[in-house]
Image (tube, helix red, strand yellow):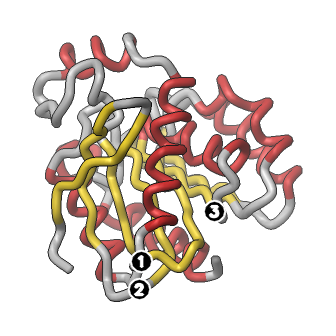
Amino acid sequence: MPGQNIEIECEGGAMPAYYDAPGAGAGVIVISTIFGVDDETRGVVSDLNNAGFAAMAPDMFWRIDPGAVPVSDMQRAQVRNQAFNSEDGVRYVGAAVAHMKARPECNGKVAVMGFCFGGPYALMGASRLGCDAGISFHGSHVGNFLSEFAAVQCPLSFHYGDNDAVAPMTEITEIKAAIDALGGSELFIYPGAEHGYMFPSRGDGYDVAARDVSWERALAVLNRM
């Protein structure tokens, strides 16, 4: 199935999303950075499809400032991020999970994969939405949601660089302690990697080696669902 733009019924409205799926497989909800469902996020969806997963990236900012924002327009991205309510976000992710489970291409197993802004939703997909795995790459402000870890009953796989300006090592250390207490979950730290190291648009911050290892580790968790 080629990638396509779809709409998800959500709180009386239609939340846009990008969707791609093989013939059948587990589902992955991809929660983007503050820049929204841009070409790089669509690329993640396609990569997951190529790995055998049905993947969907909802436009989390659909009611504030819909669509993708260029990486060069950090001010606009930050304004809509600051206006975003995390409880709204949980409901939006919940709508995406329900939609995914109802699709014939999905075998009923669903994970949430978050990048930067999306990191807390990888956690809350596990703690509140009954998802089967949570994957986070350089998740932002996960330390604000440490109480959520107590309710997690599925594997988590979190990935950070030790040179992350948004998630300092003091915060990463707290997150690692919470993950270690769960058992069956993991947090990896990549020396020298910066915030956003998974994406070429970050210029010198893009770390190919860390990206490749992170991705393979994440796929290993998804393949065990």
Of all residues, the one furthest to the bottom in this rendering is 23
Q: Earlier in the sequence, mark 2 or mark 3?
A: 2
Residue 221: which quarter of the image?
A: bottom right
Give the amino acid type for the residue marked by disc 1 in the picture: Pro
The residue that label 3 is drawn on is 133
Measured in 3D between alpha carbons, the distance from the residue under mark 2 to the one under mark 1, in whole angstroms, is: 8 Å
The kind of secondary structure element at disc 3 is strand
The residue shown at (22%, 58%) is 42
Mark 3 and mark 1: span between their CA atoms?
20 Å
The residue carrying pointer 2 sits among few (fewer than 14), some (14 to 19) or many (20 or more) residues within 10 Å by Cα, namely: some
Say which mark, if any, is on residue 84: none
Judge whether 143 appears above or below 114 on screen: above
Q: Which mark is residue 104?
A: 1
Horizontal and vertical percent position of residue 168: 56, 29
Identify which residue is drawn at 67% across, 58% down: 156
Query: Residue at 23% across / 44% down in the picture?
Result: 37
- Which is nearer the N-term, disc 2 or disc 1? 2
Q: Where residue 207 sits in the image (x, y, percent)?
A: 32, 56
Mark 1 crowd level (few <14, some 14–19, many ≥20, 10 Å Cα): few
Q: Earlier in the sequence, mark 3 or mark 1?
A: 1
Q: Which label sits in the foreground, 3 or 1?
A: 1
Q: Which residue is mark 2?
A: 24
